[in-house]
Image: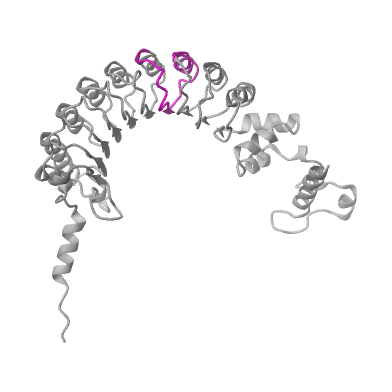
Amino acid sequence: MRGTEGLNSSFEKMMVFGEDGNMNRSNSDSEMGFGVRGGLRISEWKDIPVELLVRILSLVDDRTVIVSSGVCHGWRDAISWGVTHLSFSWCKKNMNNLVLSLIPKFPKLQVLILRQDTPQLLDDAVEVIATHCHDLQELDLSKSFRLTDRSLYALARGCPNLVKLNISGCNAFSDSALGYLTGFCRKLKFLNLCGCVKAASDRALKAIGYNCDQMQILNLGWCDRVSDEGVKSLAYGCPDIRALDLCGCFLITDESIIALANNCHHLRSLGLYYCQNITDRAMYSLAQGHRVKNKREVWTSSVKKNRYEEEGLTNLNISQCTALTPPAVQALCDSSPALHTCPGRHSLIISGCLSLTSVHCACAIQAHRTVGTVPHLAH
């Protein structure tokens, strides 16, 4: 009862004050208990226009949105068709049952976050999502350890418009199911496969390279079945790759990096942690690839401002790549001005490579020149 009184009180205040902060009700209207907005008479919460309700709900948390959908039939219908983004990550228990009961009420979802601290989701929940959310573009299923290939097959058939998919940690998926998914979800641009040791194989990467030529961000961290064969297929088929995480993919060699350098000219972030087969040849290939690209684009670029900050790699992790030498890494650093070793802007990570401590970014050279040009003060 007390909650209802508070709701009514808030409603009264909203009706009393118009958008300009002025009174917009007549005395007679006030006495009868309803407000008038541009000819529309609003006497209860259920009378709020759909557009206004959806806008209000966009300002509150997802749990409140779900609770609000049970206020009345009008609100339920408005929320059902007006809500496009939803997260269930706040649910620590019974997420699977919640998805089963609520997802059919949100057929217009475009973004759905189901990130979990402990595995709760089962295949039947993902199948419900695929059945009702055909407009879905972004789906986060990270840490859903209990899901099987059934989920990927369902998503392939029901959600062909997926652009961003996070299935990191889902170690039960197979590479055949992932390949099947890419054959239907050809608009994928972001794919997180970190820890998907069964799904992320050379066979799967060939399917990604063949089906998903718009791919821009791919995380293959700790997928230890990935080798040069898969990475080269990816480089040839997905030339628009911007960020690629190969940390822990210890089978890859210089051949993978050379293929990326020659074909993926938009590559900005590369993770090679513990890829100990990588040698100086890979670094020189990356450096040369950026130099050739920069010479070609310097005359065609219509926007010269901050051009140097945008060229080449902006993030590189070569920690534990102990075969690398300072001259090769320095050459890459020189060709990629956005790579930094200076404090506060550390984007070249070389932990565990004691021989590379002499490598420095352009900032260090500039700082040295600045110090050298400071005039001595007269005593």
**Residue 40 appears in the rendering:** no
Seen at 23% across and 48% down, the residue is 339
Question: Hey, which quadrant is residue 220 in on the image?
Answer: top left
Answer with left or right where residue 303 lies relative to residue 61.
Answer: left
321 is higher (above) or lower (below) than 9: above
Answer with left or right where residue 189 lies relative to residue 257.
Answer: right
Position in image of residue 56 (x %, y %): 65, 43
Position in image of residue 193 (x %, y %): 36, 26
Q: Nearer the viewer, residue 322 or 359?
A: 322
Seen at 23% across and 26% down, the residue is 235
Quadrant in which the N terminus appears: top right
Seen at 69% across and 36% down, the residue is 68
Q: Nearer the viewer, residue 345 or 59?
A: 345
Seen at 28% across and 26% down, the residue is 238
Q: Magenta segment, which residues? A: 149-176
Is residue 81 highlighted in magenta?
no
Position in image of residue 210 (x %, y %): 29, 18
**Residue 26 appears in the rendering:** yes
